[in-house]
Amino acid sequence: MYLLKAVSFIMAVGWTTGHMILNSPKPFGKATLNNSPLAADGSDFPCKLRPGAFEAPEEQNIVGVGETHPLSFEGGATHGGGSCQISLTTDRIPSKGSEWLVIKSFEGGCPARTSGSIGNSSTAVDPFQFNFTIPESMEPGDYTLAWTWFNQIGLREMYMNCAPITITGLPANGSQTRPSFPPMFIANINGCTTPENFDIRFPHPGNVLEYNGDPASLAPLNLPACTGVPLFGDRGVTALQVSPTSGSQLPSPVMTSAAPSWCIARPPTV
């Protein structure tokens, strides 16, 4: 009995002392940024609201239109990986009413391709490397980038770190029309709960979708990304729900040779 309690305590400590935080791009408010998930009631959404939440990092994040930028993390409790999104908003101090535009989704293997965790250290460098590309149709200017993560194993949580980012250059479409990007998926903090032990499929992953995890862990097509009635953030939940009968089927994944992942790329809707 006592041994079981001790083991449970040790496992709990392991799950809670080394969660992941964004390392690159350099996040807002690094001095006050902890590695815990967003509050279950959504009170610190977006960007883990707190004193100093939007303090700019010393190093600027400057990326050109069409350029690829590394996406890296630190920490050890990777909860079996999961699914992540990279989104942008034009608001430099985002609020619950901010419009988030998804530019890349990872279904599985994010922020790590592992069946458990990679350690307990909160400062260890994540050995798995990722990246994102600024769409060529994106207007130059100042944005806030968000990394959001839905863990595969453990409590149903949503992680979110934000970073200031400046996009330079000229959009490929000559700024004539604004491209359409899907809204950020929000769950586990708003009354809609993701299923455990699966890498969720986002209802609308956007124009660039990368598969990094074990295909056996990817949620079945008919499994909802979350269940329940969202109190906020419902646009990302209901938009183009993926199902076997959907009229907007994703194309078949294509295995890339550059990394152990599949990548689907589609031009944005204009």
Image (tube, rainbow, N blue to C red):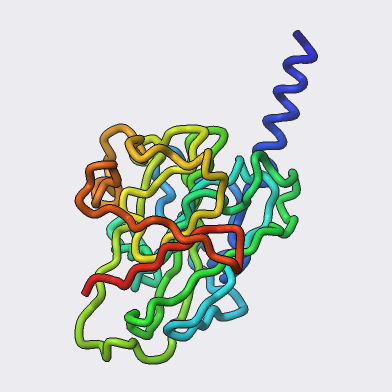
Res 191 seen here: no
Q: Quadrant of residue 103?
A: bottom left
- Tell me: 202 left or right of 243: right
Q: Residue at x 35, y 65 (%)?
A: 207
Res 114 seen here: yes
- Relative height, residue 189 to residue 97 (above, below): above
- Tell me: 17 left or right of 261: right
Q: Position of residue 222 (x, y in %)?
A: 32, 36
Q: Position of residue 221 (x, y in %)?
A: 35, 40
Q: Quadrant of residue 209?
A: bottom left
Q: Residue at x 78, y 11 (%)?
A: 2
Q: Position of residue 57 (x, y in %)?
A: 58, 74
Q: Position of residue 5 (x, y in %)?
A: 73, 17
Q: Residue at x 39, y 67 (%)?
A: 265
User: Quadrant location of the N terminus?
Assistant: top right
Q: Residue furthest top?
A: 1
Which is nearer the eye, 117 or 146? Answer: 117
Q: Residue at x 30, y 32 (%)?
A: 228
Callout count = 0
User: Quadrant location of the C terminus?
Assistant: bottom left
